[in-house]
């Protein structure tokens, strides 16, 4: 790619980013769009969003989005610090060295737009040059800075997690354990087995239990009822706003006829729901799983970490999620079913990656005009136009990749649901790990391998050749990934404008019967956003040595993301759960992988540049990085997996004499009742001024 094509991509995306930010600044002030841009604070006074995002403190973020929101913002803080230092080194030292090569020559800036961006990469430095020792030193410096900041953030967030636990009010999930694979004797029930077992082996701490029931059919009925309630609300809203008498709908039904029809269906569903609830309470619909509550946090922890049975496949215990975090629709309880589902999901994930390899091969073909003209010869004359060729090679490939990648998070979330996770947070953390692996292999490696030479997958069959092969393949795709980062500016701006939600809102305003419910703010999709952010950290670190031109664009991305997501966490997204910062270990591991990959590429680069001493001296760097990661894993990771005996007993002793604990334990008995089993009330006001309500009685 030539510099002018890169400038075209930067100009287009910068213009779109400014345009979308200006549209947001205008639309957010108009009352019809409050439900899109400020569903959490619809009546709060408006103020300029950029100063407001900057002014808010971390305590404000914690209060608005929980500790998970704090962790998400800290990812941007950490990345800005790392890439600010990297940009100083890369742009201030490495890029001039790369540009000048080994000769002091007069620079012709007039012809710079027609030069390749490879002019700014390490490939422009002469083989064996002593200037390459600057790159060697930079690798050690940026690794040291990154590891120091990783340690600082891990320690800081670990402390916030312990503080979060010690200052929190009593929470049901701290006193409750999920028990699966409950054996049942002939003629007995699951409830009887649970009660007998825990009274015998946990007599001093066991308090109560709640059996899980099969409620799949019941939930489908409730979903149907909710959909009908929404349609009724929209119909009545249209009728209230209309000054004309009710007309016939689609030439078939009158407005009142439709309302009566939906009302009748609602009454039928109500009766079916009551019958299904009655059937579900019978023993024959019990699932061999239960939420078991204890009188202390320490008692619950003992039940989790001590194996309950001589048969490891029975009486399996795990942490119970928050009652509002439980994912009731899918409750896999069989040990064999969970094992099979993990295998199926693994195979499906591999197939998805292989399919995306083909997509990446096509996308990368667009960056080469010769290959594109071979595929589509009828476009040869059009592609000779300078502007068109610059758009096709510099802008279109990254847009296509962004668009196709946007559908993957929902697929990964479905895979995690299939594995039997019983909490929304567990599903999204599992999906986050899957998305990170997918992003690394299908967005980074797929484009690196397919972009230069198809069929390069055998690179991993000979480990000794990996550094040298990557040293050739990775720099070859520098221009593509630079435009990919630049295109992401527009993606961030569309997050600010909530483009999809805005279009849905406008459609609902035109088609009144399809108006969406804006009363519930959406939740933050950490499982898709965290891997996306980590990808740009991966790109910045891996190209730090070979093509430092990418660094300022990556830094701009993180600065934009810092302000935009702080604004969104306050005004748009409402937390659905709070894991207590358990997403940070994923961030830490992803960054360590990026560092090691950078080291491997740098070793290969110095080998190709005829500087074997630098390659040899760089070998200890990935080893030291992995040793650092092992230290952090032993020092901090246990804090994110479980609370210590010291913390649990101290917290129990602090609260045992508090009068409010009696009320808490009274509520704990029913805290894990399935919402689908609660009585429902379907009602409408006689004056037709309100929509039907579906709510627990």
Image: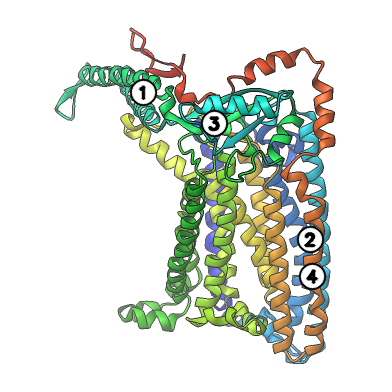
Decide: few, some or many residues near mark 2? Use Cα within 10 Å; few <14, some 14-19, many ≥20: few
Residue 39 circle label: 3
Residue 178, percent across and down? 60, 34
Whichever of callouts 4 and 3 sits on the residue coming sooner in the sequence is 3
Residue 574: name its quadrant: top right
Whichever of callouts 2 and 4 sits on the residue coming sooner in the sequence is 4
Calculate the distance from the C-alpha at mark 2 to the C-alpha at mark 1.
52 Å
Secondary structure under the numbered disc 4 in the rendered image: helix
Decide: few, some or many residues near mark 1? Use Cα within 10 Å; few <14, some 14-19, many ≥20: some
Q: As drawn, which residue projects farthest toward the front? A: 186
Calculate the distance from the C-alpha at mark 2 to the C-alpha at mark 3.
43 Å
> Where does label 4 land, which residue?
89
> Where does label 1 land, which residue?
276
Whichever of callouts 1 and 4 sits on the residue coming sooner in the sequence is 4
Residue 630 circle label: 2
Decide: few, some or many residues near mark 3? Use Cα within 10 Å; few <14, some 14-19, many ≥20: many
Residue 257 circle label: none
Calculate the distance from the C-alpha at mark 2 to the C-alpha at mark 4.
28 Å
Q: Is residue 359 visible?
A: yes
Calculate the distance from the C-alpha at mark 1 to the C-alpha at mark 4.
67 Å
From the viewer's perspective, is the residue at label 1 or at label 3 nearer?
1
612, above or below 563, in the image: below
From the viewer's perspective, is the residue at label 2 or at label 1 nearer?
1
209, above or below 72, in the image: above
From the viewer's perspective, is the residue at label 2 or at label 4 nearer?
2
Q: Is residue 41 visible?
A: no
As rendered, which of 330 and 301 lies closer to the eye? 301
Q: Residue at x 47, y 30 (%)?
A: 186
Q: Residue at x 69, y 54 (%)?
A: 587
Calculate the distance from the C-alpha at mark 1 to the C-alpha at mark 3.
35 Å
């Amino acid at each position: 790619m030539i510099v002018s094509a890169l400038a075209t991509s930067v100009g287009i995306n910068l213009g779109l980013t400014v345009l979308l930010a200006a549209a947001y600044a205008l639309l957010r002030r108009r009352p019809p769009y409050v439900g899109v841009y400020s569903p959490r604070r619809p009546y709060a006074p408006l103020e300029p969003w950029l100063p407001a995002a900057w002014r808010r403190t971390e305590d404000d973020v914690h209060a608005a989005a929980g500790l998970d929101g704090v962790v998400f913002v800290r990812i941007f803080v950490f990345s800005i610090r790392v890439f600010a230092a990297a940009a100083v080194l890369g742009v201030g030292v490495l890029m001039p060295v790369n540009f000048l090569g080994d000769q002091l020559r007069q620079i012709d800036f007039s012809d710079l737009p027609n030069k390749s961006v490879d002019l700014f990469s390490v490939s422009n430095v002469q083989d064996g040059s002593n200037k390459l020792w600057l790159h060697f030193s930079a690798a050690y410096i940026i690794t040291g800075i990154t590891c120091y900041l990783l340690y600082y953030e891990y320690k800081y967030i670990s402390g916030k997690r312990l503080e979060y636990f010690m200052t929190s009010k009593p929470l049901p999930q701290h006193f409750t354990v999920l028990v699966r694979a409950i054996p049942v004797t002939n003629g007995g029930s699951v409830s009887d087995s649970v009660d007998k077992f825990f009274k015998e082996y946990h007599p001093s701490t066991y308090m109560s239990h709640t059996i899980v029931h099969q409620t799949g059919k019941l939930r489908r009925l409730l979903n149907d009822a909710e959909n009908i309630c929404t349609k009724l609300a929209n119909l009545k809203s249209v009728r209230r706003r209309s000054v004309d008498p009710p007309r016939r709908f689609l030439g078939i039904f009158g407005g009142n006829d439709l309302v009566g029809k939906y009302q009748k269906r609602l009454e039928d569903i109500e009766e079916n729901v009551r019958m299904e609830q009655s059937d579900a309470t019978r023993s024959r619909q019990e699932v061999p799983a239960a939420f078991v509550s204890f009188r202390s946090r320490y008692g619950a922890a003992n039940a989790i970490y001590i194996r309950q049975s001589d048969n490891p496949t029975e009486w399996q215990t795990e942490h119970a999620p928050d009652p509002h975090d439980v994912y009731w629709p899918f409750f896999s309880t069989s040990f064999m079913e969970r094992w099979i589902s993990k295998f199926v999901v693994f195979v499906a994930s591999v197939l998805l990656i292989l399919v995306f390899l083909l997509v990446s091969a096509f996308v990368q073909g667009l960056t080469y005009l010769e290959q594109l003209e071979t595929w589509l010869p009828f476009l040869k004359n059009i592609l000779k136009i300078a502007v068109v060729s610059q758009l096709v090679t510099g802008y279109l490939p990254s847009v296509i990749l962004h668009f196709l990648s946007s559908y993957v998070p929902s697929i990964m979330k479905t895979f995690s649901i299939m594995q039997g996770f019983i909490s929304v947070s567990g599903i999204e953390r599992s999906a986050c790990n899957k998305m990170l692996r997918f992003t690394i292999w299908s967005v980074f490696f797929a484009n690196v391998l397919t972009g230069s030479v198809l069929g390069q997958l055998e690179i991993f069959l000979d480990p000794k050749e990996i550094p040298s092969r990557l040293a050739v393949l990775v720099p070859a795709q520098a221009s593509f990934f630079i435009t990919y980062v630049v295109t992401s500016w527009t993606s961030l701006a569309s997050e600010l404008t909530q483009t999809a939600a805005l279009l849905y809102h406008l459609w609902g305003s035109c088609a009144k019967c399809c108006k969406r419910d804006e009363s519930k703010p959406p939740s933050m999709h950490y499982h898709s956003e965290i891997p996306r952010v980590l990808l740009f950290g991966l790109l910045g670190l891996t190209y730090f040595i070979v093509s430092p031109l990418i660094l300022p664009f990556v830094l701009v991305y993180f600065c934009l993301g810092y302000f935009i997501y702080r604004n969104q966490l306050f005004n748009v997204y409402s937390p659905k759960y709070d894991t207590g910062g358990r997403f940070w270990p994923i961030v830490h591991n992803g960054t360590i992988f990026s560092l090691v990959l950078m080291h491997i590429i740098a070793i290969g680069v110095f080998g190709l540049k005829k500087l074997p001493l630098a390659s040899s001296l760089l070998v200890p760097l990935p080893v030291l990085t992995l040793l650092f990661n092992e230290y952090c894993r032993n020092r901090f990771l246990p804090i994110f997996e479980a609370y210590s005996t010291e913390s649990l007993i101290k917290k129990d002793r602090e609260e045992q004499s508090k009068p409010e604990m009696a009320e808490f334990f009274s509520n704990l008995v029913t805290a894990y009742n399935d919402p689908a089993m609660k009585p429902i009330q379907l009602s409408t006001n006689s004056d037709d001024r309100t929509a039907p309500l579906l709510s627990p009685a």
